Image (cartoon, rainbow, N blue to C red):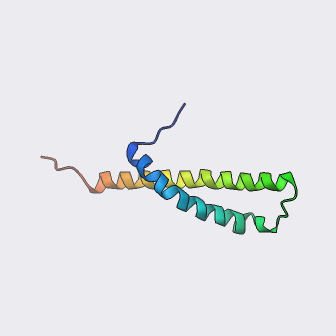
C-alpha cells in the first residue's frame, strides 16, 4: 500500500520540511535526549543518534502533513464557491 500526497500538499511539503526537521532535531538532540553528553566512541551511540534523527524526520513529516491538511480543510470551509 502506498500513500500519496495531493499535489498541493506535495508542492509545499519540501519548503517546510527542512525548517521543521532542524527545529525538531535540535530539540531532540540537545533537550530531550541530551546527546551532547555522549562520547560517540561506541557504535551504540551512533545508533542512538541515527534513531533520534529518524524520529525527528518522521515527526516533522507528520506535523507538516497535518498542518497542510488542516489548512486545506479551512480553505474549503471559509472560501465557499458561489452557489446559485
**What residue is drawn where x is 38% and y is 47%?**
8
Find the residue positioned furthest to the top: 1
Residue 1 sits in which quadrant? top right
Find the residue positioned furthest to the left: 84
Give the tally of numbered discs: 0
User: In the rendered view, would you say 74 is above or below 6?
Assistant: below
Question: x and y percent of residue 83 in the render?
Answer: 16, 47
For this rendering, which residue is in front, 84 or 50?
A: 50
Find the residue positioned furthest to the right: 42
Looking at the image, residue 35 sits to the left or right of residue 24; the answer is right
Question: x and y percent of residue 15 in the render?
Answer: 46, 56
For this rendering, which residue is in front, 22 or 1?
A: 22
Question: x and y percent of residue 11 in the render?
Answer: 41, 49
**What residue is drawn where x is 83% and y is 64%?**
38
Looking at the image, residue 68 sits to the left or right of residue 30; the answer is left
**What residue is drawn where x is 32% and y is 54%?**
75
For this rendering, which residue is in front, 61 or 84?
A: 61
Looking at the image, residue 14 sits to the left or right of residue 34; the answer is left
Question: x and y percent of residue 68 in the render?
Answer: 43, 53
**What residue is drawn where x is 64% and y is 56%?**
56
Amino acid at each position: 500500500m502506498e500513500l500519496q500526497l495531493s499535489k498541493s500538499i506535495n508542492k509545499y511539503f519540501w519548503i517546510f520540511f527542512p525548517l521543521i526537521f532542524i527545529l525538531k532535531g535540535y530539540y531532540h538532540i540537545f533537550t530531550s535526549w541530551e546527546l551532547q553528553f555522549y562520547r560517540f566512541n561506541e557504535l551504540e551511540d551512533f545508533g542512538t543518534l541515527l534513531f533520534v534523527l529518524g524520529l525527528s524526520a518522521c515527526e516533522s513529516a507528520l506535523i507538516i502533513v497535518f498542518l497542510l491538511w488542516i489548512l486545506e480543510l479551512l480553505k474549503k470551509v471559509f472560501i465557499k464557491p458561489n452557489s446559485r
